[in-house]
Amino acid sequence: MEPLIWCICPTTDKYRDFLPRAIESFRAQSYGYKRLLVWDTSEGNTPYIGQSPLISHRLPAEIAHTVGGLRNDAIESIIHEADYIAHFDVDDVSSPDRLSVQLAHIQKTGKLLTGFYNMPLHDAKNEKTWIYANEDHRYALGTSLFYRREAWERVKFPDQTPEDNKWRKDVGLDNCESQSCFRSDGSPIMVQTVHGGNASARIYPSSARYSPATAEQSRIVREMLK
């Protein structure tokens, strides 16, 4: 029996333009035993296009005020079913093998937590792509987190925005082993869209860990984001 992976996708009114793309990215995943939870904090239960037996759409009765709180509420609603949990944020695009790649890696390492320590970030406003890379492979970009149910059962997300760095440290750096977002041919497994409303202001190029993408990398990213 394959383990069940629950993908958590928080959204609200101002991000609805991204939602159809995120749903299609989920549906395209080659891994079969998966579910997507769209955790909608819009005002009113606004319907969206893309209903599927694999997708749950839930509007919390009481809306948390931080990303950490939202994640906890969403995970609490599905934790009894999940073997693994993947962040599937509404402004990201994942290649079809993302879940399979991350599942294989976490099973190989035996760690509680994995993710990508590098990733392309596409600035939608200025049409520029940057590559973020962290030399510490115990680090994982929050948008790429993939973890065993036990990790969240041990430690809930802090009630703050952003929430992922503190949570990862609370789970324990030695419980995390990340991998590269780039395949051997240079193509990425994930792309994050930078649009001005991201949870962390530090997502914009602000240190030596950010470098401009090459022309070829930029071309590939644009193809993924179509």
Image (cartoon, rainbow, N blue to C red):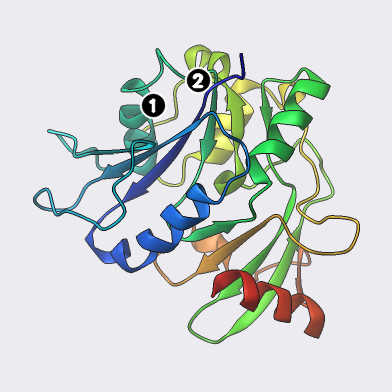
The amino acid type, in three-letter code, at marker 2 is Trp
Q: Name the residue under label 2.
A: 152
Query: Residue 199, can we see it?
Result: no
Query: Looking at the image, which residue is at 80% across and 49% down?
Result: 180
Is 123 or 91 nearer to us in this picture? Answer: 91
Q: Where is residue 185 in the image (x, y as percent from the top left)?
A: 89, 63
Q: Where is residue 147 in the image (x, y as percent from the top left)?
A: 60, 27
Which residue appears farthest toward the left when viewing the image?
44
Whether pointer 2 and pointer 1 mark residues with C-beta atoms closer than 8 Å, the reply is: yes
Q: Name the residue under label 1.
A: 75
The amino acid type, in three-letter code, at marker 1 is Ile
Q: Is mark 2 on a helix, strand or loop?
A: helix
In this image, 176 relative to 171: left or right?
Answer: right
Query: Residue 73, can we see it?
Result: yes
Few, some or many residues within 10 Å of mark 1 (<14, 14–19, 20+): many
Q: Earlier in the sequence, mark 2 or mark 1?
A: 1
From this view, report whether residue 127 is shown above or below residue 64.
below
Q: Which of marks 2 and 1 is in front?
A: 1
